[in-house]
Image (tube, grey):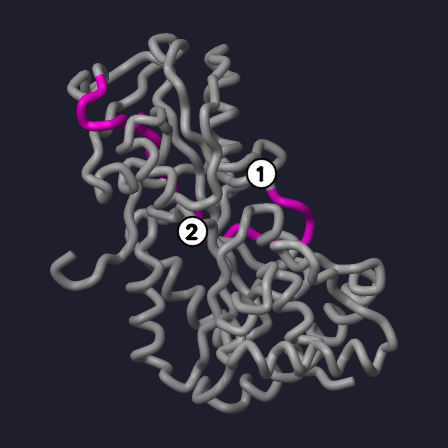
Amino acid sequence: MEIRQLRHFMAVLTHGSFTAAARAELIVQSALSTSVKNLERELGAELFDRTGRRVVPTEAGLALVPAARAVLAGTEAARDAVSAVSGLHTGRVRVGTIQTLTCVDLAAELAVFHRLRPGVQISLREATTPDLIEAVRAGELDLAYLAPDAAGLPDGISAFATWHEELVLITAPGHPLASAGRTLIEDLVDEPFVDFRAGTGLETAVRRLAGHCGLERRITCDVTQIRLLVDLVRAGIGVAIVPRRIGEEAGLPCISIRQPEPGRTVVLVGRAPAPRNPGARALLEQLTSAEGCVRGAAPSAAGRPGGRRPPGG
């Protein structure tokens, strides 16, 4: 059994398909499939059920997860130890993010980091907040941007910086509210909504806002991709509540919501008290110097929306 095979196994588990896993691992799908099949042959059991549209782990696959995570975490610890004496000329930094991150221009931040340390490989994963927290706790991610719920962060996870994102109502261009500028939550009682799938950070924030104001939303469509949500709103399927920058970049009407003014807190987290990976520590220092962040604050703190932007952006 090789470490590479365990990494490929976990990649399929994380991304839900061999195609997405191969893309994340930067290899062709046939090579990744062969790697997983060889692992199954060595263990004498099938690790995935491949009959459905989405690849799901079998009981044997689920049983392998804790051991695979432990082995890979040990491997990363060894890699971190070597990287610590290599002057950051090599290594790997693993970053997670929610799909609807807008308070930081993560692409621009990672580009700056790459120019400074071209030998350090960057691995980026999009996932829901619960999955990101679990990946950080398991040592699969060094840092992650997430939107925690009211329960806050679990033990062993540190919040290194926070940002505040304003949430607005977006509508189709011809919608009666499109030119309103501002609206009350109670005015949305008859509106159909397009929403993110339950469990995502944005859905949690919107559900909490609606519940606080006593609004029972009528969900006409729920999605897992922000681009599809925007397209459905533009087509008139319903309205949606999203971070302001998403609505502005889509060119859709953005209506401010009053009573209360809605927003959500985005937190940059890692394992407590600080990342062991020297590359992650260097990236953390850069990310926490970004405009608008509140360094070392509790998840409930709020800063001004911001983030370094690319030149001319």
Single out the residue that lies furthest toward the left.
312
Horizontal and vertical percent position of residue 92: 51, 78
Q: Is residue 192 visible?
A: yes
- Vertical side of 301 occupied by 5: above or below: below
Q: Residue at x 47, y 87 (%)?
A: 90
Q: Residue at x 50, y 16 (%)?
A: 212
> How many other residues sit within 10 Å of disc 2, few (<14), some (14-19) or many (≥20)?
some
- Vertical side of 182 occupied by 195: above or below: below
Q: Is residue 166 magenta?
A: yes
Name the foreground residue: 83 vs 214: 214
Q: Nearer the viewer's eye, disc 2 or disc 1? A: 1
Name the image quarter holding residue 177. top left
- Position of 229 with respect to 7 (left or right) is left
Name the foreground residue: 163 vs 26: 26
> Which numbered circle lies on residue 295?
2
Q: Which amino acid type corresponds to the residue marked 1 in the rendered image?
A: Gly
Position of the C terminus, as image quadrant, is bottom left
- Vertical side of 277 occupied by 146: above or below: above
- Give the residue number, with chain letter if any, for mark 1: 199
Name the image quarter holding residue 250. top left
Q: Which amino acid type corresponds to the residue marked 2 in the rendered image?
A: Arg
CA gap, disc 2 and disc 1: 27 Å
Q: Secondary structure at mark 1?
A: loop
Q: Main secondary structure of the magenta part?
A: strand
Ranked by sequence position, the earlier of labels 2 and 1 is: 1
Q: Residue at x 63, y 34 (%)?
A: 151
Q: Is residue 271 visible?
A: no
Q: Which residues are magenta?
A: 153-175
Single out the residue that lies furthest toward the right.
44
Position of the N terminus, as image quadrant, is bottom right
